[in-house]
Amino acid sequence: MKVAFITHYTHLYGANRSLLNLIDGLSKYKVSAHVVSPGEGDMAKILQDRGVPVAIMPIQRWMSKRPSSKEPLRWIFLYALWLRNVLRRFYRNFRLLPALAQQLREWEIDVIYTNSSVIPIGALAAWKLRLPHVWHMREFSDLDYDIYPDWGTSIFRRIIGSADALISISEAVSSHLLNGVANERVHIIYNGIASEADFDRFYKMSQTKSRHKEHYTFALVGLIHPNKGQETAIRALAIVAKQYPDTHLLIVGGGDTTALERIVSELGMENNIEFWGYVKEPYAAYLAADATLVCSKYEAMGRVTAEAMSACLPVIGFDHAGTSEIIEHEHTGLFYRGGPEELAACMIRFIKNPGWASQLGYYGWHIARKKYSTEVYAENVYRVLCSITHR
């Protein structure tokens, strides 16, 4: 089976990392992966190094931020600019479609697989070539990134509903994005984040970590974005540091940290917080930490949560959306609701009881190995592929 995966960005963030895991896992079933990327970058380089055919095409999104202003004249101006960009992106996708279709013909593709809800061109190509189409829903879009369908929710759902199969990374995403879409075509499949062999390797690595550190260390991994909760974590640490002044926080992820660094300076926490920036391999952060924080209120699934569990780390997560489907309170981690004060209370529980917190991490590892391995992930997706190709 030859599958063309269409990805919406070039970096090695969650969606692309999950796609790489999927491609690796599907190789067992002799699925030949081909990838269409909107540009050069880390993702394309890794794929090319693995011998996966990659086509670089300027794919356009069909979601964006809505214009906003309290001044009527300025709103009209911003709306006009937004509408122009909407039409421009639509036109560019329309112009790109023949070239994409030709590339897919040359690859002799059996299935088109769109790796995100934010790009529509896979649906157009599938319609043009009369090929089966799988659409993977990996984000809330409006709730987590404040972007909305250019043509409205009704048209968006009508078009995604035309896919032969829809995969959602959590019940929360399915409920939010796919409400009204025929249930028989919707499949809830959690991301696979590592092979079973890697799970075993991470377990051994965790056992060799020093248990006599001078300070307890938390890690928060993810794109620097207001919705990811980095500010909440910083303010929570400032509360914790009043009782445990040596507690550390690692903030790991790409993006502008200027505003966050200003808050750190105002709170006098420069010696407690490290900004690592973007890292290709987040396990370096997990291995340097004692626990992980997931402060996003709208985590689609929570790849970071599952990754931390694979590294035997207990997780403190905001009790909502996809995070609520992964963490088991007081068994693999802790839930909190509210702001920095509530998060700080959970952090202090771990610091006071490091042995108990560590045990939660090992419970989490056992659960994650059964539910979030690449093998389980690929098997579930392969069944979907077979169901729409009648193999």
Image (spheres, rainbow, N blue to C red):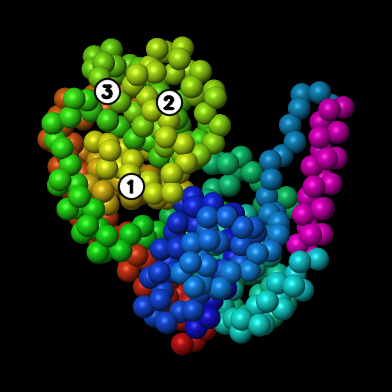
* Amino acid type, residue under disc 1 in the picture: Tyr
* Amino acid type, residue under disc 2 in the picture: Thr
Q: Which mark is residue 15?
A: none
Magenta stretch: dominant SS? helix
Residue shown at 74%/31% (left/top)?
68
Q: Which residue is mark 2?
A: 232
Q: Is residue 331 above or below residue 62?
A: above
Q: Are marks 2 and 1 in contact (CB under 8 Å)?
A: no
Q: Residue furthest bottom?
A: 391
Looking at the image, tell me whether mark 3 or mark 2 is earlier in sequence order: 2
Query: SS at mark 1?
Result: helix
Q: Which residue is mark 3?
A: 247
Q: Quadrant of residue 238?
A: top left
Of 71 and 34, the residue lying toward us: 34
Direction from residue 5 to residue 245 in the image, left or right: left
Q: Position of residue 332 (x, y in %)?
A: 23, 44
Q: Which residue is mark 1?
A: 283
Q: Quadrant of residue 255?
A: top right
Q: How would you rate the neighbour count of disc 3 (Cα within 10 Å): few for under 14, some for 14-19, many for 20 or more?
A: many
Is residue 34 in view from this perspective?
Answer: yes
Direction from residue 4 to residue 292 in the image, left or right: left
Is residue 189 in view from this perspective?
Answer: no
Of 276 and 111, the residue lying toward us: 276
Q: Quadrant of residue 370?
A: bottom left
- Between label 3 and label 2, give the one nearer the viewer: 3
- Between label 2 and label 1, give the one nearer the viewer: 1
Mark-to-mark CA distance, 3 and 1? 20 Å
Query: SS at mark 3?
Result: loop
Q: Which residues are magenta?
A: 73-94
Q: Position of residue 291 (x, y in %)?
A: 27, 36
Of 42 and 305, the residue lying toward us: 42
